[in-house]
Every structure is written in structure tokens, then in C-alpha cells.
Amino acid sequence: MENWFHGEALKDVFPRLDGKDLVSCMLVCRQWRDIAKDDYFWKCVCTRKWPSISNAPPGTTYHRLFATFSQPPPPRKQPLPLPSLTFEDLVFYVDVWTEERKILFSTAVSGTVLRAGLTNIPDGIAESLKSHLDKPDCKMVMPVNPRVAITYGNTATVSVLVSRKDTKKMACIANKAIFDYVDVTASRALAYEYLRFSPRRPFVSDIRVWVSLLFLGSGAHASLEVFGLEIDFCDAATSEVEFLWLLDMLDWK
């Protein structure tokens, strides 16, 4: 008789509980578990969480509905498969111009050289830039040799094309992107442009490429002495595999 009254009391309490508490009650003992299995209690939970459920009952139990959809699964970042493209396949064509259309820097550099980065980091650069260049993460950095000077306040632009040996095609990374921001604390002038992706990738968009001119000193002088250039996709890619997948999705022609 005592267990019967106990059970009736639980049947009065359980409809008032939320799903988390009802799950906890199922772990107390066998009697509580058997009572809490009644789908009516889970219907009470689900209709409070999703009121529209009461208009058309689901094609499953309310208990299963709650267990399946009450909380999102924990995010799991799956490793990307290896891309078919490699840095050995790529050649980058970089041209930096002044506003008078005078060429400041022009070179064709292999993907392996760009990926290898700077072999000698010069003295006299900002500590934040030195720390960035010293990090082992993926970077595409090349030396500007001989170094060039850009008069402070003058506009410079950059164009970057890339070719791939495996398909004999080319893509545009940047087209006359303007270096319109100088980050003095990081010793770099920055230009960006939105990448052009293949029409076969209609849901990939709004990803920027950043091209940085790396200069010596604090930028407090009349001109910037540029010793390096960096290309990165900091909005979307940080690892070598991510870099290559992003490049592979460009509009190759």
C-alpha cells in the first residue's frame, strides 16, 4: 500500500519536471524508472519545449523525441581528407605597383618556396611580427629582394595570379588590391580581396585573401622599407591542408 501511494505521488510530480530532472529520476531506483518510462510524462516535457508538437503528434514516442533532439550533439571537427593539390604543383605570380603604375616588385615564385617562408628574419622588426614569423604554423611568406621603399602615404596595389602544373590552369587570387591599411604595431601594410571560387562551389563565398607587405622598423619614417610579403587566408584557413583545399576551390581557367 505504501508503494502504491508513493507511486501515485510520483505520477503527480513527474509531469511538472523538465526533461533533465526526469532523466535523473529514472536513475534513482527501479520503481521510479518504471514510472518515468510512461510516455505521458515525456509528452508533458516535449509540449513545453516544442508547443507545436501538441498540434500533430510525432511518428515516434515522446521519450525518443526528447532524447534525440533536446540537445545538439557536441561539435566534432572531422579532419579534412588530403587534397589532390600540393604546393609543388603551384607557381605564384606577384606584382606590386605604385599609384603611378610604376612596378615596385615583380616575381614568380614556386609554392614550395612560398610555403618555406623566410630563411633569415631580419633585425629591426616589430616584436609581434617576429613572433608571428617564428611560429611553426602554416604561412606563405616570401622575401622581397632587393628590398623596396614605399613613400608613406602613397598608394600601392598588388596583383597575384597562381598556376597549377597538374591541370595547366591559372586562377586569380588578387587583382589590384589596394594596401589601404598600415598596422604600425605589426609592421605590415595590408590589402585584401574576396576570392573567386569555381561555379561548382556555389555555397563557398565571402572568404578573403590578405596580402601583407612586411616592413622594417615602426613605420614612423617617411618611407616603409619592405623586406617581405605574406599571403594568407586568416578568415578561413590556418593549416597547410586548409590552404590547399581553399586554393583548389578557386575558379581555375
Image (cartoon, rainbow, N blue to C red):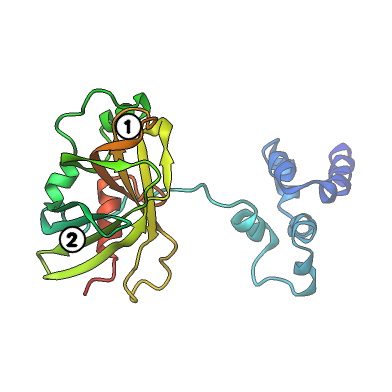
At label 1, the amino acid type is His
At label 2, the amino acid type is Ser
**In the rendered image, the vertical position of residue 56 relative to residue 239, given as above or below:** below
Q: Residue at position x 21%, y 27% from top?
A: 122
Question: Residue 81 vs residue 60: left or right?
Answer: left
Pinpoint residue 213: horizontal percent, then vertical percent.
Answer: 30, 43
Quadrant (top left, top right, bottom left, bottom right) of the N terminus: top right
Q: Earlier in the sequence, mark 2 or mark 1?
A: 2
User: Pointer 2: residues within 10 angstroms few (<14), some, or many (20+)?
Assistant: few
Q: Is residue 163 visible?
A: yes
Q: Residue at position x 23%, y 71% from top?
A: 252
Pinpoint residue 114: horizontal percent, then vertical percent.
Answer: 17, 46
Q: How many marks?
A: 2
The answer to whether the residues at label 2 and label 1 have Cβ atoms under 8 Å apart is no
Q: Which residue is mark 2?
A: 84
Nearer to the camera, 218 or 152: 152
User: Pointer 1: residues within 10 angstroms few (<14), some, or many (20+)?
Assistant: few
Q: Quadrant of residue 131?
A: top left
